[in-house]
Image (cartoon, coloured by chain):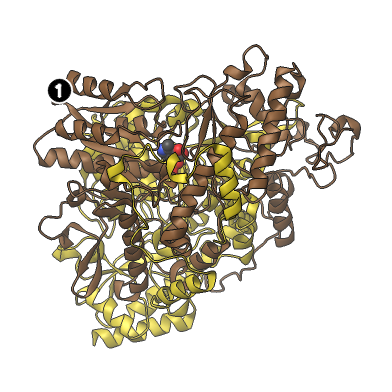
Chain colours: A brown, B yellow
Amino acid sequence: MSMNTQGRPTSAGDAGEAAHKTFTGNKGLAMEEPLIFEIGHQNITGVDLDEPEDFEAELGGHARQERIDLPALTEPEAMRHYVRLSTKNYAIDSGLYPLGSCTMKHNPRLNEKAARMPGFADIHPLQPLSTVSGAVDLMDELSHWLMTMTGMSAVALSPKAGAHGELCGMMAIKAAHRANGRDPKVVLVPESAHGTNPATAALLGYKVVAVKARDDGTVDTDEVKAKIAENEGNVAGIMLTNPNTCGIFERDIIEIAEAIHAADAYFYCDGANFNAIVGKAKPGDLGVDAMHINLHKTFSTPHGGGGPGSGPVVLSDRLAPYAPLPFLRKGKDGVELVETTEGVAEGEMPFGRMTAFHGQMGMFVRALAYMKSHGSDGLKQASEDAVLNANYVRVGLEDLMSLPFGSRWCMHEVLFDDSFLKDTGVSTLDFAKAMIDEGYHPMTMYFPLVVHGAMLIEPTESESRASLDLFVATLRDLVMSAKKGETERFSGAPYLAPRRRLDETQAARKPVLKWERPSATEVQPAAAQ
Amino acid sequence: MRYLPLSDNDRASMLERVGVKSVDEIFSDIPEKARIEGLLDLPRRSGEMAVERDLSRLSAKNVSASSVPFFVGAGAYKHHVPATVDHLIQRSEFLTSYTPYQPEITQGTLQYLFEFQTQVAELTGMDVANASMYDGSTGTAEAVLMAHRVTRRKKAVLSGGLHPQYRAVVEGLSDMANDEVVSLPADPNGTEDILARIDKETSCVVVQSPSFYGQLIDLKPIAEKAHENGALLIAVFTEVVSLGLIEPPGAQGADIVVGEGQSIGNPLTFGGPYVGLFATKQKYIRQMPGRLCGETVDAEGKRGFVLTLSTREQHIRRDKATSNICTNSGLCCLAFTIHMTLLGGKGLSQLARINHTNAVKLKKALSAVPGVEVINKAFFNEFTVKLPKPAAEVTEALVARGVLGGVPVSRLEPGKKDLENLLVVASTEVNTDEDRAEFAKALKEVLA
Ligand SMILES: Cc1ncc(COP(=O)(O)O)c(C=O)c1O
């Protein structure tokens, strides 16, 4: 078996299953794990509770008739079940996670510790405000950091993730139009936008008008102006990502903002890529009216396998009065949390409420811990390193892979297209799956939609130079292999992951969305499944 | 800086490799007038000890639920979470993984989501559940939008027993989307005539049970009337532990069941992150919002799991998607499903009986206080009491006596005279007889 300098096997399949079949289906430390429904029981428990002696029902005839058909696991069994499941996951803590647009940076454990302090984790959103002044102060301090970094005048903390922040920002925009007696129906959205942008606009009944990109990957300013003219008096706003999803800073952004403002419309900025410019530029100076900040990207709160996130929205002077409930107000006795319209003062016109309670407090604590740890100097350094790392990857690969917009600087992420794979018989998907065998999580694929077979790489500032060197060397090796016609390395990949490629067509054609008890005739050995 | 692996030497040689003299060259697309000169006006970096000290100080200013007799509910509940849960959700491979878009290397996440969906479907008595919404309130708004898609109507009828902040979320979104909402007045004891409000234009009826006020509601007649009129019944709950003891909404005819899952596995955390549970009937799955995890096989025929039916979602369908949701409550689902696995169905029912027993005891203790009237006949672990004076004053006075004694309805429904004296109180398994005695004693003093 051939090895590279790190001692990894370089030819696929060597360590494959064919080499050594096992009775259990396990492969050494790689364990197969059945579903809890296949190993659990009704007559064991993982929680010791005392049956109440004096149970008397005041349920008014609403008692459940049938027992709940869900098994339990004891504590050691549960521990093993979930630990085994965990080993089937790729994670930032185990390797480079170059998922463009997602900012998979290191998640400091100090943040986890802080979020678990009893004064944060063990307080109720509706206990008397006099008993949670520290929590309100923390929200205020976070707001201060966010407003200072963005140069904006207000912040709505409550949105629960990026898309929810988009909804919040667009609702503020709609409220502002209404207050001005207007009801424009069109929102401009560049083709390169994330799917949540058009989906958000559509939720509010807006018509989405696409704006084309220029050959250099930036939004075409003339197109924006043309679309404004075509929909004269009917444009509510634009939803623009900056740096954009091609990893490029929109250099005409101020001109676009001015054109939008001249049309009595608002500029919503998707702040998913804020990590590139913290400490380098303030969105407020770019003409932005509203921008969500994914605390789970830029400010390191963990992605948790899909969430939870947190998506505070910063607002310009023009939109600040419409910020939703709850909001913070500075008074002479400190900061106040305004929760209902009754508490609203003159000039405050909250458009409503995004969620019950006050937002993702657990994420606020983590994000603030991150901000304080970095400070103004560290935040700036982090952005610079994120951008430097992405460019380092770019120059390491640009001779072999194809840059759709030519050799130019990128921000925190670098976008390749699939033209370098032309005639190799290898697709973007195959290429990405082969990265899995090499121990890497694939980059974002097929997004943004403006280039063919997109591969969007965001290394983040958390990677060392050695880590980037190995990553680049690995991708170079893969590209060479594809160009040499070694299609097998790609077409069947991954070979070495806990699972080979999964049949998504079958999953969608006949959806099985929960476990069903097998009929007596088809009982299978659980572990071998 | 401890989180940044590049040394100054690395930076210098990498800049050279990139072909620039300084990093600022790379940022030259930023319009000059928008560039930040120097540093932001914020404190400089801090070591771990200093940050921890800072945050501890803020934490210490708050009164934590475990430190006092605690009876606050109204949409979020103090329960005991086994230590195993918090340990497991901090496994790096769960905590620091992204949405499982690459199923070959995220079977851990996908399998627990599949298990989670199965548990939620069984608890709610529905065919299918999704892989979570942000929380109960946003899930409720999404359920209303889904009902509009299914029925092609635009009018939602909201019960007066719905959590006022849930109502506000639905009303706000509906208003912005130009959909109609009929909100019934506050209904503390479950006597509203919601049937009379359902007609042929109604898309959905939204009913919470146990209600915001703790009242258990019979959903069956509402489901019947809704179905006669071609409308859907959306059943909402904020206390998922109640499903251990009361008839699941699915068995009562609900078409969509949505609720808050915080009580199982997740700490209070001042309101978030929580986990929205969302379940419906098989025939509506293509109108569901949010991610769904489904079973399939891999190239070798081994069972595996993937995210599926994504053509409903924003990343594929963009402006035609069923929702804009992307990031959801992944890790809170994990906490939920681990706690639920430790409990099992039997354990959950037992936990629910303990909760109910404690609430019945609390009812007795408070009923004995002169001037206090319990207004609910059927309840789970929470109910509403009518006090002889404004409830907000009472809770403040209770704080002075070291008791966190419920939520004044006026906090969420201010300016309504008839609700001013109402207090919503909850008692879960964490309360002891001493807690209840202390509460009753303090309340007696405050009302004297
Ligand atoms: C560019 C962009 N916009 C918006 C979003 C949506 O953010 P969230 O997943 O937090 O809702 C994402 C993240 O997935 C994104 O990459």
The quarter of the picture showing ligand 1: top left
Relative to A27, A253 lies left or right: left
Circle 1: residue type: Glu
Q: Nearer the viewer, residue A505 or A529?
A: A505
Q: Is residue B157 visible?
A: no
What is the number of callouts on the image?
1
* Residue under label 1: A232
Snapshot quadrant of residue B319: top left
Q: Position of residue B428 (x, y in %)?
A: 47, 68
Dot 1, how many residues are within 10 Å of its Cα: few (below 14), some (14-19), or many (20+)?
A: few
Residue at 75 percent across and 44 percent down: it is A33
Q: Position of residue A273 (x, y in %)?
A: 43, 41
Q: In the displayed structure, would residue A473 be above or below residue A57? A: above
Q: Position of residue B291 (x, y in %)?
A: 50, 36
Report in which chain the residue with disc 1 lies: A
Q: Position of residue A235 (x, y in %)?
A: 19, 28
Which residue of the protein is positioned furthest toward the front in this rendering? B21
Relative to A346, A471 lies left or right: right
Residue at 18 percent across and 74 percent down: it is A332
Q: Is residue A75 visible?
A: yes
Q: Nearer the viewer, residue B292 or A98?
A: A98
